[in-house]
Amino acid sequence: MFQEDLLSGKHILITGGGTGLGKAMGQRIIELGAHVTICGRREEVLQNTADEFNAAHPESASWQACDIRDADAVNAMVDACWKERPLDALLNNAAGNFIARSETLSHRALDAVLSIVLHGTAYVTMACGKRWLEAKRPGNVLSILTTYAFTGSGYVLPSAMGKAGVLAMTRSLAAEWGGRGVRLNAIAPGPFPTEGAWKRLFPEGMAEKRMLSRIPLGRVGDHAELANLAVYLLADQSGYINGEIAQGGLEFQKDVIASRGNLGNDEGARKGLSVPTLYVAKSKALQDWGHGVGVTKYLYKVGVADDADATIAEMNETQFAGRGDWKLLKKTKTELDETAATERVARREQILDPDFYPQIRGAGGVFKVKLTNVENDMVVRAALASEHEQIKTGTVKEKDIVAYLLRRAEEDDAAGE
């Protein structure tokens, strides 16, 4: 389809380039002669992907660990890229998303997505754009959007807001910078299955038939199709295209996961939406560490996931909190997101600060449980259930702690505090 040297000599930065669509596009870009720098937060993933690229095409890929939510880190990363060789193009692919009813979202839940999708994308775009303009070099920015950036969608509010912002950024800067040699375009691909995002947004095949019925082609996209489109927009041969949004597959007219008739109906929403799982987990090694340093041995992780078992497996694989022996103690269906759940537990129990303890850096949602709080909760509940039932102090079992944490997460008692 393309000349083998179509992108020869170009240096292209890809955010979120270690996995999924970013990796697929990076591979195709390299095949056509470019050198790519991939960036993301997980060093091991980046290293493995770069090694894979370089094994097939020697010296074709570099990587930079960077949290694009941090503007200073972004500038340092772009500086490092420039020292290697000036960038010719930026592919904004990094994103974050989860499914939740909008009324349950806290400000932290909103910020968690917007800080990546909108702010992070803007930080990288501005960092590259400033350098191109100062050096009077041509530049090219290609951003990956979503179809609901145009239409809106239920249950993915932060992502829809963020992607709509990136759409506005693309067209605004295309107008402002186009005459100075920097062009900006975007792709709203439609549904392209990936291992990570696809499972989060469409667990267990949720709404797949409904979605496919609304795609004129009757199928989802293939990664190669997106990669080839990205290549064209990154190539000099598309130099007159500026401020355009290429859409694939379909436009979501109502919402991603449920028909409009379900939006006000909890039972209908449950049928169209996989309800997340609230879970409690522990690491014996982490508990032993907590006991040894005088924190407490009663350390438990509270979280929310579409698939709690898979999440625990991933925690062990990635050494969450520096430990690989995490065990799922109990799980239950919930309508909460993880931020809301941990905020509720934190009203009674102290969360272990991952920035204070280097051994667990980056590990959120781990609580230091006070047994007196558990005992008091048990006593109150026993008294409500039966005036004759009594709870002896010092008899708290792990199952009691787990049940207590689940109740604390599910019961919103903020109004009484």
Image (cartoon, rainbow, N blue to C red):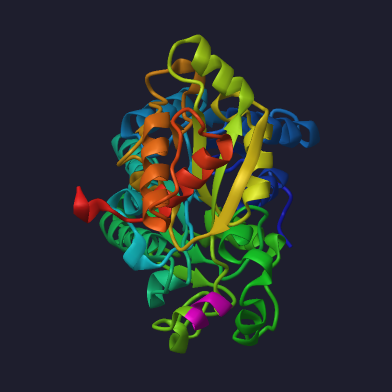
Along the line of sight, which residue is nearer the eye, 245 or 366? 366
Displayed quadrant of residue 228: bottom right
Q: Where is residue 95 in the image (x, y as percent from the top left)?
A: 48, 51
Along the line of sight, which residue is nearer the eye, 334 or 52? 334
Along the line of sight, which residue is nearer the eye, 394 or 267? 394
Residue reaching furthest to the right: 56
| Residue 10 vertical placement versus 409 (above, below) | above
Q: Where is residue 47 in the image (x, y as percent from the top left)?
A: 65, 29
Q: Where is residue 146 in the image (x, y as percent from the top left)?
A: 48, 66
The residue under the point 57% across, 73% down is 248
Does residue 235 appear to the left or right of 56 in the view shown? left
Give the main secondary structure, helix, strand or loop, of the magenta stretch.
helix
Along the line of sight, which residue is nearer the eye, 14 or 379? 379
The residue under the point 28% across, 52% down is 107
Does residue 212 appear to the left or right of 137 in the view shown? right
Can residue 244 be seen from the camera position used here?
yes
| Residue 9 vertical placement versus 188 (above, below) | above
Q: Is residue 237 found inside the magenta-colored segment of the image?
A: no
Quadrant location of the N terminus? bottom right
The residue under the point 54% across, 26% down is 321
Q: Position of residue 226 (x, y in %)?
A: 63, 62
Question: Which residue range is magenta in the image?
Answer: 267-271
